[in-house]
Amino acid sequence: MKASFVDEHCVRGVTHTGKETLVMAQNIIIATGGRPKYPMHIPGAVEYGITSDDLFWLKESPGKTLVVGASYVSLECAGFLTGIGLDTTAMVRSIPLRGFDQQMAFLVTDYMEVYGTNFMWKCSPSSVEKLENGRLQVTWENSESGKMEMDVFDTVMWAVGRSADTQHLNLEKAGVKINPENGKIIVDSLEATSVPHIFAIGDVTEGRPELTPTAIAAGKLLARRLFANSSQLMDYSSVPTTVFTPLEYGCVGLSEEVAMEQFGEDAIEVFHAFYKPLEFTVAQRDASQCYIKIICLRKQDQRILGLHFTGPNAGEVIQGFALGIKCGATYPQLMCTVGIHPTCAEEVTKLHITKRSGLDPTVTGC
């Protein structure tokens, strides 16, 4: 059923058969999420390209694949396509994993390159054409060389971001304000829109993390405020997340770049280490991108501002430490925590070398 506003208290629903229903409500919650975007300015992008949504519905192998973009969706898809043996290329216009810690992001892409994913850096596609044999010829500009280049692929997948699914909601009929640049709904700390009894949660909202668990948590708290006399608000700080690339990257809290912007370089301390997971040792795998760092305040109680981890089961590792950081854990408290041996997570409890020292952070021995 597709829904749209009639006014601020009335919603019209239409089924796929055309049956129409009007629903009146005292409070209305918008949770329509987002949809993958197509680069509409690129000839052939819509006609011949697919998105991550389409990828999982293909009836046959995508073959030689070009993934355009450097978001977590792009890198995750490029990673598993490479993993199943397909010739896969990721085209990156600027930087990988924008919004994430950039040192960690490049460790992820370095690992992917070592294990077979091709990367085209500083490149922007300009057109997609379908050849007589059914394959797709992609032309792009290399901003480093200034030259136009081309290659032929079986599949072109766009992973250039998502847009809020608000176009058909008739929000103007209800007086709900949006960000005109991306269509996202502007909300306050109560998840209320510009119309106090109309709320919005999840990817459809402006400035919120685009993460399913975050939207679920916000929805539960909103329901309790509306129907159970609760006053608890969603805390969007220190939300943990993981990028499920071939080498997983998990993090919680601030990136090193953001911490430096907020507190200044002299006010933070970064403890870090390169480590070798036990499972990498048995298989004799290269572990040069397995890395951990925590960002702390230098003075006072050395409160931990952020934790970043690349390695096996990064999501499982970060989930546990996220509680501590949410509760204001400090570096001395972390050092008093006994690690579980032999695990990757125990390496977090042994971080003692600072970037400032210039010492080799490579872990040796057990």
Image: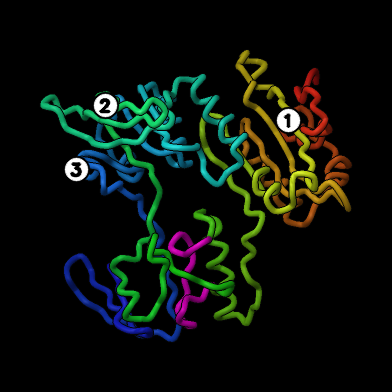
Q: Secondary structure at mark 2?
A: strand
Q: Nearer the viewer, residue 333 or 118?
A: 118
- Badge 1 density bin: few <14, some 14–19, many ≥20, Cα 10 Å: some
Q: Which residues are magenta?
A: 191-207
Which residue shows up at 41% across the image and 37% down it?
A: 93
Left-right relation of 30 to 53: right
Q: Which image quadrant is residue 139 in? A: top left
* Residue under label 1: 343
Which residue shows up at 88% across the image and 44% down it?
A: 332
Q: Residue furthest front?
A: 146
* Residue under label 2: 153
Asked if one can make out residue 252 in the rendered structure from this viewpoint, the answer is no
How far across and down, in percent of the image, does residue 265 sit? 75, 44
How far across and down, in percent of the image, does residue 18 sit? 17, 71
Which residue shows up at 70% across the image and 48% down it?
A: 259
Q: Residue furthest top?
A: 284
Q: Is residue 286 magenta?
A: no
- Badge 3 density bin: few <14, some 14–19, many ≥20, Cα 10 Å: few
For the N terminus, the quadrant is: bottom left
As measured in the structure, the alpha-carbon distance from the residue carrying label 2 to the one carrying label 1 is: 41 Å
